[in-house]
Structure formats: structure tokens, C-alpha cells
Image (spheres, rainbow, N blue to C red):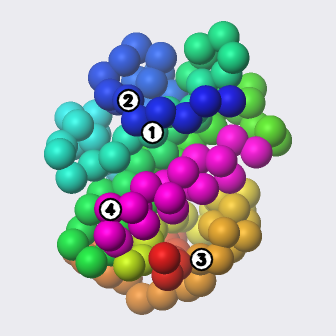
């Protein structure tokens, strides 16, 4: 598995993001989905990563947004065909390295309560529950988590 910073404006990456949007749309109402669109993922304050298999197929993605003193994790997704291979953990490890190199002091994220696999991944990586941050409001369908770097 190879992880590189890439543009999200690629057909195979857009297809993954569309899968993530559809999945979240099935689980939560629109007001509880806090997804960044493809154009937002191309901003200069965003690091967007893609995991590819040995054949170059996009297997997963993840990003972080520089929010000043902390980085916000966004758009974590692993294609269902590649799950169970540690790709999510590898993406998070790369996010941690890059956010640390960028001078961030912590990572924060918002995730939904109906995504136990994602929550377990974040907990394994040292994330703990925290209060809503940034522009987020309290939402019974959301969990807010943070991890020191």
C-alpha cells in the first residue's frame, strides 16, 4: 500500500467520496452530515491523502485541515473491497505524521455515532471524546474526539 498526497479531483477518488457520501446519507440526516466537498478539499489548508494498492487502485483516503493550533481530520474512508487490511490505520498514521510536521499540536474530528468501526479506529489511535469544536454545535448523532500530537 502506498499513501501519497493527491488531488481529490480524480475519477477514482471522486467515486470513493461518492460512496462515503451515500453511506453517510443512509445513516444521518443532512443536518448531521459535515462532509467537505471536492472543491473544498483542494484548498491550500487541506492535506488530502490517497492510499493505493500495488496496481494503483484507490483503496482509501483521508484528509486534515489546518485550523491554526490543531488539525481537523476529514473524509476518512476505505473502499469496502479493501477493508480489514489496515488501510484506515495507515492513513491515520500518515495524517498524524504530516500534521505533526506541519506544527499542529492536536488532531480533532467529528464522526457519527452509527460508525463503530471508525470510532474504534480513532480510539485505538489515542483519540478521546471532547466537546464540540470550531463551528460544530452539539448534535446527538455526532461524537467529537481529539488527540494530542
**Whole-number angstrom distance, CA of label 1 to CA of label 4:** 15 Å
Q: Depth check: 143 or 56 in front?
A: 56
Q: Magenta stretch? A: 86-104
- Looking at the rendered image, the disc whose residue lies closer to the viewer, 1 or 4, is 4
Indicate the position of residue 52 as horizontal and vertical percent values: 60, 25
Where is mark 4, residue-wise? 102
Q: Residue furthest front?
A: 101
The residues bearing labels 2 and 4 have C-alpha atoms spaced at a distance of 17 Å
Counting residues from the start of the chain, the first of labels 2 and 4 encountered is 2
Left or right: 65, with 146 as reference point: left
Residue at the outermost left position? 44
Up/down of 15 relative to 139, above or below: above
Residue 49's disc is 1
Asked if labels 1 and 2 touch by Cβ distance under 8 angstroms, the answer is yes
Marks 3,4: beta carbons within 8 A:
no
Q: Secondary structure at mark 3?
A: loop
**Residue 15, image x, y percentages:** 47, 21
What is the residue that sits farthest to the bottom in this orientation?
Answer: 131
Name the residue located 61 percent from the left edge and 30 percent from the top edge: 2
Amino acid at each position: 500500500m502506498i499513501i501519497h498526497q493527491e488531488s481529490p479531483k480524480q475519477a477514482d477518488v471522486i467515486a470513493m467520496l461518492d460512496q462515503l457520501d451515500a453511506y453517510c446519507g443512509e445513516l444521518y440526516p443532512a443536518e448531521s452530515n459535515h462532509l467537505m466537498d471536492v472543491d473544498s478539499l483542494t484548498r491550500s489548508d487541506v492535506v488530502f491523502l490517497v492510499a493505493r494498492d500495488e496496481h494503483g487502485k484507490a483503496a482509501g483516503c483521508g484528509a486534515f485541515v489546518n485550523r491554526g493550533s490543531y488539525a481537523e481530520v476529514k473524509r476518512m474512508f476505505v473502499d469496502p473491497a479493501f477493508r480489514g487490511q489496515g488501510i484506515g490505520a495507515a492513513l491515520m498514521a500518515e495524517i498524524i505524521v504530516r500534521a505533526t510536521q506541519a506544527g499542529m499540536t492536536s488532531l480533532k474530528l467529528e464522526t457519527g455515532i452509527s460508525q463503530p468501526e471508525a470510532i474504534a479506529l480513532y480510539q485505538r489511535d489515542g483519540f478521546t471524546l471532547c466537546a464540540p469544536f470550531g463551528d460544530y454545535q452539539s448534535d446527538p448523532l455526532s461524537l467529537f474526539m481529539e488527540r494530542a500530537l
